[in-house]
Amino acid sequence: MTAAGHLLDIADLSREDLDAILDLARRPDLAQALSGKGVAMVFEKPSNRTRNSTEMAVVALGGHPVYIVGDEVGIGSRETAEDVVRTLACYHAIVCARVLSHMTLSKMAAALDAAGSSTRVVNLLSDRAHPCQALADVLTLEEHLGPLGGRRLAYVGDSNNVCRSLASAAVMLGMKVAIASPAGYGFDHEEAGAVRRLGVLSGGELFMTDDPREAVSEADAVYTDVWVSMGQEAEGTDRRAAFEGFSVDEELMAGARPGAGVMHCLPAHRGEEISPGVLEGEASWVWRQAENRMHAMRGLLAWMCSAPSGSPDEQGRRS
Ligand code: CP
Ligand code: NVA
């Protein structure tokens, strides 16, 4: 968590924070930590899982979610990101946002900190990161594999927002993560170093290759995501050509550990990054993974309400 308690990416959490959130996510009987409080959810891009899981998690904790279409508040066009979030902080304990640019989240968090507000910002997906997805992913991995230290996770495809947050969380929990991306679509040196540093205490490791077969060899779970993320539609033709041979299909899965699970954050493009048979096959964990978005969100929001720095109880007093 940042000093002020925002969650912009997994690196904002310590290992202890991550374990505490996952413990809460496993509990079906959480207290009404958001009773009487508002949670704003701003979406500059479409969503199915994130919107619904967040909304239901807020309701489960006794709070009131408000869904806001990006165009309605017009971040950067009708009003600055700073003015949008300072206004929302007058009514809400937490402002969750899915944004076109990660910079918008940084501006929002900085504006709240400068104003002395205790309202927190949560990233619901940016071009850089998808930390709430990663929380559900490691929850799903632990459900199937138990403690993750030393276990192997392969990610095949674009080293994108989902991949960055997933690798960070998995390495923090001690996993050995192998990522296979075509040349030009992997992490740069700085990004890889940042992920590796998160594994120093846990023994987690990051390995990068351009060979999907090498990445999945010995893997306990194989993860993929779309080749063309939201906002990259103009690159679609080039990307589909570049990612040829990076499909998670029956042939590739034959090279993983027997019984290895298959993961995908969804939405899936069957016949591109994943074959229909693998997505719906016995080894697929994707539907449980989708359900876990809600449990992980409940754990995160409950944890944010109990975390010491700037409890949402103080919301309104300092904003
Ligand atoms: N996995 C995920 O974030 O899905 P949505 O885009 O539907 O929210
Ligand atoms: N990488 C994808 C994830 C969608 C949940 C995107 O950003 O569109």
Image (tube, rainbow, N blue to C red):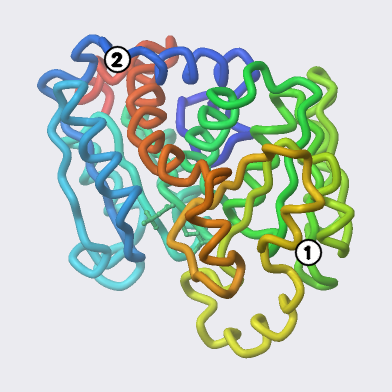
Task: Count numbered badges in the picture.
Answer: 2
Residue 75 falls left or right of residue 143 = left
**Element type where label 2 sits in the image:** loop
Q: Which residue is mark 1?
A: 181
In percent of width and height, residue 218 lies at 84, 40
Q: Quadrant of residue 89?
A: top left
Say which residue appears at 22% left-offset and 40% top-offset. 55
In percent of width and height, residue 194 lies at 78, 41
In percent of width and height, residue 175 lies at 76, 29
Question: Which dot marks residue 28?
Answer: 2
In percent of width and height, residue 309 lies at 44, 15
The type of residue carrying mark 2 is Pro
Q: Are marks 2 and 1 in contact (CB under 8 Å)?
A: no
Say which residue appears at 76% left-offset and 74% top-offset. 245
Question: Which dot marks residue 102?
Answer: none
The type of residue carrying mark 1 is Ser
Decide: is 315 above or below 68.
above
Residue 187 falls left or right of residue 166 = right
Front residue of 277 and 307:
277
Cα–Cα gap, marks 2 and 1: 38 Å
**Quadrant in the picture for the C terminus:** top left
Residue 295 falls left or right of residue 32 = right
Graded by Cα atoms within 10 Å as few (under 14), some (14 to 19) or many (20 or more), the crowding at tag 1 reads many
Residue 236 falls left or right of residue 313 = right
Sooner in the amino-acid sequence: mark 2 or mark 1: 2
Decide: is 195 above or below 211.
above
Say which residue appears at 37% left-offset and 31% top-offset. 297
Front residue of 52 and 316:
52
Q: Quadrant of residue 123?
A: top left
Graded by Cα atoms within 10 Å as few (under 14), some (14 to 19) or many (20 or more), the crowding at tag 2 reads few
- Whether disc 2's CB lies below 8 Å from ligand 1 is answered no
